[in-house]
Amino acid sequence: MVFIVFAIIFIGYLIGKINIKGVALGSAGVFVSALAFGILFGAIHDRIVFTVATDIAPYYREVNIISWVTVNERTGLVEATPMRVFRTFGLAMFIGGIGLIAGPTFFRNFKKKFGSYVAMGLATTTVAAVIAIVLIASNAIKSPAMATGLLMGALSTTPGLSAAQDVFSDYEAIVATANGVAYPLGVLGVVLFVQLVPKILKKNMDVERKKLTDSLASSPVDKKEEQTSQLEQSQDSSKSITIDNSEMLSEPIPKKKLITIDKLGLFVVASVIIVGMLFGSLSFQAGATVIALGTTGGVLLTGLIVGHFGKIGRISLKVPEKTSFVIRELGLIIFLATVGFEGGLNFLSVVADYPLLFLYGGIITLAPMIVAFLIGRYAFKLDVLNNLGSVTGGMTSTPALGALIYTAKTEDVGHAYAATYPIALFSLIFVPQIIALIF
């Protein structure tokens, strides 16, 4: 299994380097590679065997070399359950890295653009939910469970899928099948959207990066406060100096240095993931729905807090930028390799059985993105990178954030993602219950 994961990553990076008129998948090429591997292994998983010698009779036996790919007898779907450990591992690393990178300026930026993040997050969820409700009401999709699973796949949200399976507990297989139809296009659709929109609008990335940097910089009020603080400090220091020819001016007492546990910052990364996963596991009941931040929300929030404060007492929680970038990229490609592989296992059979579902899933992916982007552009006048960052957060799309970072060539787009993601996540968790109440 480890060999397969790294083979997917190896081929995925080659795919990601393919550039067609300025559009390249980058790290998201790993998802395409994983999808292809999943389709292949889903078709032949039970036929790849080889013969080994044994010490007891019979002297030879057949062994399936990918025995970790099995068929779920209850749902009839092909699964690679052990690979989900890699998925969680990669997701935690990627989100932890994003939180640590965005943390130092996140809360100030969130306060400045709070209204836009809330509006875009809620708009994404609302549009997707309305489309699903219309599909059910018009009998285009007769099963509310299937429509809800399709919605969660189109928005590529694992917490939302869990919420849907909780609400429609008697139809878990239907929810999972519909989710599997929409998920691959849900990932690739957002990845392509964040790369094509700047091309369509003919945006200069150097100019857009400058706009994004300026929007994250201190506002005039912040600068005035900083200047006032500096002036007060200089006045205080001048008052404390007494001119006396008979005495030497004493040198200022140096501040105590912070304690660094390890220079690479891996201790801090591990701490963020541990605390974040514990925090994300906390849940509370809202009617029939269990609400929890999950790994993504818990680790993201913890990373933002740690990145913002940077220390606890005399213990430094600073992580070198290079470490954060490596952790983020490594986590992303491992996550993409696993979710793409799982999405490919049943892709052909499910699409063949439900071709219209594939189309409906594409609509649910595309429409919320367009609406949210237009709201950001015309209602809140967001620059294109802040806008697209919010779109990726509203779509709860981790792979799309990776693609946007690749396209924009700046980690700063993670601020908008981190701000919009929790809003979209919380609202999505309630959607299955709303649909169940209506139908």
Image (cartoon, grey):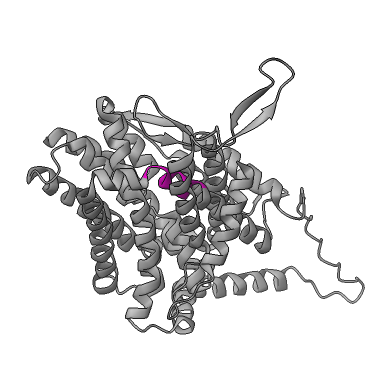
- Farthest residue in the top direction? 57
Instruction: Please provide percent x and percent y for residue 333.
Output: 55, 55
Instruction: Please provide percent x and percent y for residue 292.
Output: 40, 36
- The residue positioned 49% from the left and 50% from the top of the image is 37
- Farthest residue in the right direction? 246
Membership of 378 in magenta stretch = no
- The residue positioned 24% from the left and 57% from the top of the image is 123
Membership of 345 in magenta stretch = yes
In the displayed structure image, the side of residue 111 where residue 85 appears, left or right: right
**Residue 383 seen anywhere in this rendered image of the structure:** no
Vertical arrangement, residue 356 with respect to residue 435, above or below: below
| Secondary structure character of the magenta stretch overall | helix
Quarter of the image for the N terminus: give it: top right
Vertical arrangement, residue 115 with respect to residue 343, above or below: below
Quarter of the image for the C terminus: give it: top left
Instruction: Please provide percent x and percent y for residue 107.
Output: 47, 58
Q: Nearer the viewer, residue 61 or 415?
A: 61
- The residue positioned 49% from the left and 52% from the top of the image is 34
Boundaries of the magenta span: 338-346
- The residue positioned 52% from the left and 67% from the top of the image is 16
- Farthest residue in the left direction? 138
Vertical arrangement, residue 431 with respect to residue 361, above or below: above
Q: Nearer the viewer, residue 98 or 303?
A: 98
Instruction: Please provide percent x and percent y for residue 271.
Output: 64, 42
**Residue 75 seen anywhere in this rendered image of the structure:** yes
